[in-house]
Amino acid sequence: MPRMTMIEAIRSAMYVSMERDEKVVVFGEDVGFFGGVFRCTAGLQKKYGTSRCFDTPISELGIVGVAVGMAAYGLRPCVEIQFADYVYPAADQIVSEAARLRYRSAGQFTCPIVIRMPTGGGIFGGQTHSQSPEALFTHVAGLKVVVPSNPVDAKGLLIAAIEDPDPVIFLEPKRLYNGPFDGHHDRPVTAWSKHALGEVAEGHFTVPLGKAEVRREGSAVTVLAYGTMVHVALAAAEEKGIDAEIIDLRTLIPLDLDAVVASVKKTGRCVVVHEATFTSGFGAELAALVQEHCFYHLEAPIQRVTGWDTPYPHALEWDYFPGPARIGEALAAAMEA
Amino acid sequence: MEPHAPLSLHVPEPEVRPGDTPDFSSVKIPKAGSVPRPPVDVDPREIRDHAFSIIRVLNRDGEAVGPWAGSLTPDELMAGLRHMMTLRAFDARMLTAQRQGKTSFYMQHMGEEAVSCAFRMAMAPGDMNFPTYRQAGLLIAGGYPMVDMMNQIFSNEADPLKGRQLPVMYSSREHGFFSISGNLGTQFIQAVGWAMASAISGDTRIAAGWIGDGSTAESDFHAALVFASTYRAPVVLNIVNNQWAISTFQGIARGGAGTFAARGLGFGIPSLRVDGNDYLAVHAVATWAAERARRGLGPTLIEHVTYRVGAHSTSDDPSAYRPKTESDAWPLGDPVIRLKSHLIRLGVWSDERHTQMEAEISDEVIAAQREAERHGTLHAGGKPSVRDIFEDVYAEMPPHLRRQRQQAGV
Ligand SMILES: Cc1ncc(C[n+]2csc(CCOP(=O)(O)OP(=O)(O)O)c2C)c(N)n1
């Protein structure tokens, strides 16, 4: 099996999907000739022509609005927003239109679109190249929200998203594009080529939406994480020597509640981790669900490790980004109680 | 009904790609001095042609010709030359500093120096610019200290923005420079709002908005035109058409419109195109537009026709999407060399004095960098305080942030 970076795996997913279904079209800013600023769409235009992969004007509202119209026609647009931080101009088309088209037309019109966007911090991108907006989308009824943590999942989940009959927000942690990242910014980065999850099948396969994966088995405490934080949590558990079970949620909506509940019932303790700000973050939803479904099994208060409730700072990125030390403290706190 | 042939999608393509010979034959360049200069209270309908032509003052021989000439004295022109040369030297040093890991990122102005440097001289104290990331000339020509610009770029302990903003995203209220956002286009409509506020308040100050050719596709651009037109806001709306939006040529944003300036016509906004590599022309047009705004005659849309010689940013490699020699083929030349030739022609400048000034400026920039680096660079030396992460989110820190600050151990 070839070894792929997450970028290559995402690109491979689009190749496979465009090959199998001529209704799949790919577009966005710099996506066509150049292949995207992160190179995720490189070569697609050459292979499938400018009608199926093209550059757009810099208008996120336009990109998503056009995708909704195309979906109403019967195509399957897979669009790129250059950075998740730039999705806000498209909010109306996503929230008011894409998310509820099926509902308000009683199924006459549907919106099978995928909106891909690089997300998260750790690259000195400052306030406008670092945000994690997943909670905004999980709050909107009618959207699915996916956050892969490795190349295999990225490819399988993206193909599943493109084949899905509903609108999917596909958040790509850009810190993982070229290799796993354990939160130690001062150490050399490892490459996906050295990682089992960098071995990605060439052809068609899917990873179903709504299924979490246990990344590390353990019995002392459950860590719920997704995206980059899966790797940081793994590092934290190793370094603390704590027998943590780490669950990679992979999709936030639909959420694999069964996997979450089973694990917390087993361990009796829970730590929730994300990069996004704390207040009203997706971690709050997870904590509420865990207490609702596992209250009598909990032996300690649920801990949350997140970004601070401030905009993302440029120079002090590493004091903002939840690293292994902060997750380690939360693990210890969960174990103490 | 007649049967129709199947439809196909039209996707605009640039004339040339890497490996091809650069071709600007489609950029129609009128002779310097050939575009009329209307009175500032002209009826916009009478100057529709100005949205399709290019106002130029400096001709090939370095002479200033035509009705738009004569808005600047030789001393002012020499100051303008110094500003542009300073910006270019500043760019060169900061690009190197980025490669040395002293900052995360940098964006240069190569080829576009005249646009912001000349425009700044048409603004008065108290006026407000709403810039994007390629108008540092507004600060340099406005006398903002270079050391502070570098402190911002290095995100060091003396960074006026406390390490919060990306490099080059400056902010100086005092110097009429609104805080830059990384989100394209958002400032354009805000400029209109500031100008409307000035009108509401019975003030005399005006605003200027700035946007790139690519970013004119954002809804904020269109919102700005409709509000500016409706309320006759005292604002100058600048589009910097440097031909490229990262890898995407200007035709993608322009679509079927003749020019970017022509977008103003449907709103009844006087719309002009100017040679953005001609310091004199930019200044003359900026002065004309500012005067309209000050007299309560409403907004003006200006398309500055120029070329982005450098890469989009330090993360970009332009040779992947355009011919390597394209910038040499750009028909409007180099703004610094053009102004230099004009000053030599006027008899107030010489190659020797130019070389001498280059050396002086280089010393100034190096001295400023030394001073800034005493306060640290991104990965070395003095840093903003971690406590600063939590300040300025709100005027007063609410309890939940206080708690988080404690948790962070600061
Ligand atoms: C809302 C938004 N979308 C996308 C981007 C990413 N982006 C940054 S610069 C740029 C190109 C801008 O081109 P243009 O407006 O022509 O200005 P130039 O860089 O050429 O000066 C893009 C797409 C962004 N910063 N903000």
Image: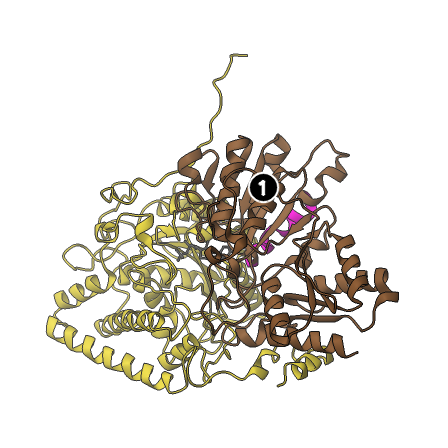
Which of B148/A26 is in front? A26
Above or below, B110 against A116 in this view is below
Residue B402 position within the rendered picture, expressed as x and y whole percent measured from the top left: 69, 82
What's under tag 1, amino acid-wise? Answer: Ile
Q: x and y percent of residue A193 in the render? A: 46, 55
Q: Chain of mark 1?
A: A
Give the labeled residue for mark 1: A159
Query: What hue does chain A carry in this figure?
Result: brown
Q: Position of residue A266 (x, y in %)?
A: 79, 63
Seen in the picture, residue B143 relative to A171 is either above or below; the reply is below
Please name the color used to draw chain B: yellow
As for residue A73 lying within the magenta part, the answer is no
B170 vs B320: above or below: below
Can you tell me which quadrant of the image ligand 1 is in? bottom left
Q: Which quadrant is home to the C terminus of chain A? A: bottom right
Part of the protein shown in magenta? A85-97
Q: Is residue A179 above or below residue A188?
A: above
Q: Main secondary structure of the magenta part?
A: helix
Q: Residue furthest right?
A: A296
